[in-house]
Amino acid sequence: MLDLNFVRENLDAVRTALASRNFPADALDTFVELDAERRRVIVEADNINQARNAASKEIGGLMQSGNRDEAEAKKAEVAGLKDRQTDLETKRDEADAAMRELLSGLPNLPADDVPVGADESANQEIRRRGQIREFDFEPKDHVDLGEALGIIDFERATKIAGSRFAILNGAGARLSRALINFMLDVHTTEHGYTETLPPFLVNRTALFGTNQLPKFEEDLFHIKDDRGFALIPTAEVPVTNYHAEEILDAADLPKYYTAYTPCFRSEAGSYGRDTRGLIRQHQFEKVELVKLTMPENSEDEHEKLTANAERILQLLGLPYRTIVLSTGDMGFGAKKTYDIEVWLPSQKTFREISSCSNCGDFQARRMNLRFRRAGGAKPEFVHTLNGSGLAVGRTWIAIIENYQQADGSILVPEILHKYMNGVTKIG
């Protein structure tokens, strides 16, 4: 959530930033109106409070001098002032609530170095790693390869659950488990993350904290009971909320967390997109990276987090590129985002496999997550960062397609051999 005082004091800059994100800046017109009303009632309430205090002193003097009738008349007048003050305080609270609701619907403001553009066409590639393989045969996609090997089953998954679900079998399931263990091992032993296993159900407060609510209500799978639970769309939600409503010690920052979880998304509004295979599923798996940092360190920590995610692809020998997203293509809560895209031979293009975002204090403000510097300083909001390290299903796809052989078998990347009990080929 944006800082109310910052918005109030920088209206023109905020309007420009929102426009760069394709967000209607006229929402700020309502903000200005609410802010003016809030200020007006506060001033009037303060004036009434001063008048009540003065009248109370006057009543005391009248009572001491024996002018009881005049004192009683003054008391009636003060009672009317009290009723008016209560009414004004109610209006103030209503304006506060309306302003908070309005601010909760505004996206984060982009960092100064984010490319300005209306959509993904303005994204900028910043690096490319790995050698794209030249096949001496026509490469197949992961669906044809997986079904021929018997390691993936879409038909029975649809029978059991519906479209956009899959079942992995045999070496396919083993490869998925190997990837999860491999990613967690790298992030915990090489990159310094603490592994955590969070709940897969969260409440509405947690979903608001990481900005899934109120904007992305339709993307969630809700549990139909009176507790308001939803299945997590990403481990970012429970892990970033881990320290919500807390004041951390600056000496304990930064905090690094990594978590494997399944993720559940309704994919509202994406019908017709990526319907073939594992690219866009209602249920998928990820290893997530989350960082909590002090404000002055978040940019550097963002670069490190992105490098941590890239390291997985480097160890797996998969070609990829990293791009910085434009203002018009960033997620709602991000101030800057790097997307890492892996090469898929069947599509002859790069596809997103990780999105690494610096959210600044946007999420921390929503979940009231703060830290305190030494010497009893005033609490400040932490900066939160998150990214996939990596999306397991899309990594599985990339291995199946990039390591396919002419006979339809799949070579297992060397780094995964120990996680596959020595299996070096799926065939």
Image (cartoon, grey):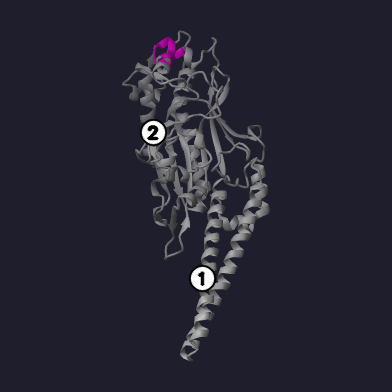
Looking at the picture, tell me which residue is in the foreground, 318 or 293.
293
Residue at screen point 41% across, 21% down: 161
Q: In the picture provided, is 279 more to the left or to the right than 176?
A: right
Residue 394 position in % (x across, y down): 47, 25
Residue 27 position in % (x across, y down): 64, 48
Q: CA distance from mark 1 to mark 2?
A: 55 Å
**Is residue 88 depicted above or below 338 in this figure?**
below
Based on the picture, tell me whether residue 413 belongs to the magenta stretch: no
- Pick out the residue farthest to the front: 69
Q: Which of the 4 quarters of the picture holds residue 197?
A: top left
Q: Name the mark on residue 108.
A: none
At numbered mark 2, what does the secondary structure look like: helix, strand or loop?
strand
Looking at the picture, tell me which residue is in the foreground, 415 or 74.
74
Would you say the residues marked 1 and 2 are in contact, meaning their CB atoms lie under 8 Å apart?
no
Q: Amino acid at mark 1?
A: Lys
Residue topped by disc 2: 261
- In this rendering, which labeled residue sits more in front, label 1 or label 2? 1
Quadrant of the rendering where the C terminus is positioned: top left
Looking at the picture, tell me which residue is in the foreground, 202 or 166.
202
Residue topped by disc 1: 82
Looking at the picture, tell me which residue is in the foreground, 57 or 67.
67
- Pick out the residue farthest to the left: 421
For marks 1 and 2, the one nearer the N-term is 1
**Is residue 193 depicted above or below 426 in this figure?**
below
Specify the segment rendered in magenta: 145-155
Residue 256 position in % (x across, y down): 41, 44
Residue 306 position in % (x across, y down): 50, 38
At numbered mark 1, what does the secondary structure look like: helix, strand or loop?
helix
